[in-house]
Image (cartoon, coloured by chain):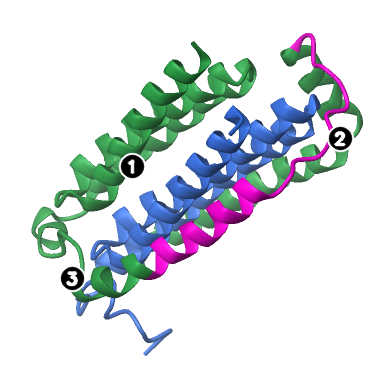
């Protein structure tokens, strides 16, 4: 097994752990942290394949992923703060209505 | 030598990622996430992507983690405290499914072939900069618009209702 494949396996594992975190956490903030972990796993795959192929396009895409992650955190945390301000908030599995 | 560095960093990364999704308190979870960001920057360095490792440290470890901690301080603590931990039933159903998915994807990665290498990058930072400002100039401009829209959206969402 070459070391590139080990890196790709590691990044798949990190991505799936982040997905598990989105499924199982009760708190909305930690769910957002888990999505950051998933984005990190994707970044690791892009950089690994880049190193193997000897190009830099994957690193440019990782840069864009970092940008989108920053934007996502800004909007997501704004949404979470306004959800926490609601009266009848009961944890992440209870938010099933769009607006009532 | 390469394998030793990879093993140590991979172990650190997996432990901190698992800690981030399994510990009870959200603040501890964010600290574990910070540790995983540091391990990821180390992995980027060992892959020869110095620019991305630096950006990872600046954007994730400084900006995003501080932002999370600031937002947690604005939320009433008893509301955060009530929803600590994980859902047990979802863990029991989700874990076997994700293990099977990992085994399938790992089988594909181990059996498959990677594409042929096309060249060697001499100076990483110079190459990334050149590619970013020639081939990817338009997506780079679009990224600035995305950040602007996200800023306006965050201001609108965070406003108190009158």
Q: Report the disc number at residue B88.
A: 3
The reply to whether dot 2 and dot 1 touch (C-beta < 8 Å) is no
Between the C-alphas of marks 3 and 2, the distance is: 47 Å
Q: Which chain is blue?
A: A
Tell which tag, 3 or 2, sits nearer the viewer. Answer: 3
Q: Please tell me whether mark 2 or mark 1 is closer to you in this view.
A: 1
Task: Specify whether residue B10 is in view.
Answer: yes
Residue at x 34%, y 31% (from the top left corner): B11
Residue A72 is situated, as x and y percent measured from the top left of the image, at: 52, 52
Give the mark, 2 or 1, whose residue is nearer the N terminus: 1
- Side (left or right) of B158 relative to A27: right
* Residue linked to disc 1: B17
Q: Are marks 2 and 1 on the same chain?
A: yes
From this viewpoint, which residue is outermost toward the bottom? A100
Name the disc covering residue B137, or none. Answer: 2
Q: Mark 3, residues whose alpha carbon is within 10 Å: few (<14), some, or many (≥20)?
A: few
Magenta-tinted stretch: B97-123
Q: Which chain is green?
A: B
């Amino acid at each position: 097994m070459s070391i590139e494949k080990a890196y790709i396996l590691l990044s798949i594992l990190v991505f799936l752990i982040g997905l598990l975190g989105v499924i199982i956490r009760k708190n909305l903030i930690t769910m957002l942290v888990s999505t950051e972990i998933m984005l990190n796993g994707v970044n690791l795959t892009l950089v690994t394949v880049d190193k193997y192929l000897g190009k830099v396009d994957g690193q440019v895409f990782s840069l864009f992923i970092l940008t989108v992650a920053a934007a996502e955190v800004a909007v997501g945390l704004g949404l979470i703060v306004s959800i926490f301000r609601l009266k009848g908030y009961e944890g992440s599995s209870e938010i099933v209505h769009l607006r009532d | 030598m390469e394998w030793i560095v990879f093993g140590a960093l991979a172990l650190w990364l997996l432990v901190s990622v698992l800690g981030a999704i399994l510990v009870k308190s959200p603040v501890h979870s964010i600290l574990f996430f910070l540790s995983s960001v540091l391990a990821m920057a180390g992995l980027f360095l060992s892959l020869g992507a110095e620019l991305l490792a630096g950006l990872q440290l600046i954007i994730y470890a400084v900006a995003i983690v501080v932002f999370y901690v600031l937002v947690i301080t604005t939320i009433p603590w008893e509301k955060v405290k009530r929803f600590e931990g994980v859902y047990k039933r979802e863990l029991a159903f989700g874990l076997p499914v994700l293990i099977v998915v990992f085994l399938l994807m790992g089988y594909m990665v181990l059996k498959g072939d990677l594409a042929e290498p096309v060249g060697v990058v001499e100076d990483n930072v110079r190459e990334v900069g050149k590619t970013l400002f020639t081939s990817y100039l338009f997506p780079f401009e679009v990224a600035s618009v995305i950040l602007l829209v996200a800023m306006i959206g965050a201001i609108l969402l965070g406003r108190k209702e009158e």
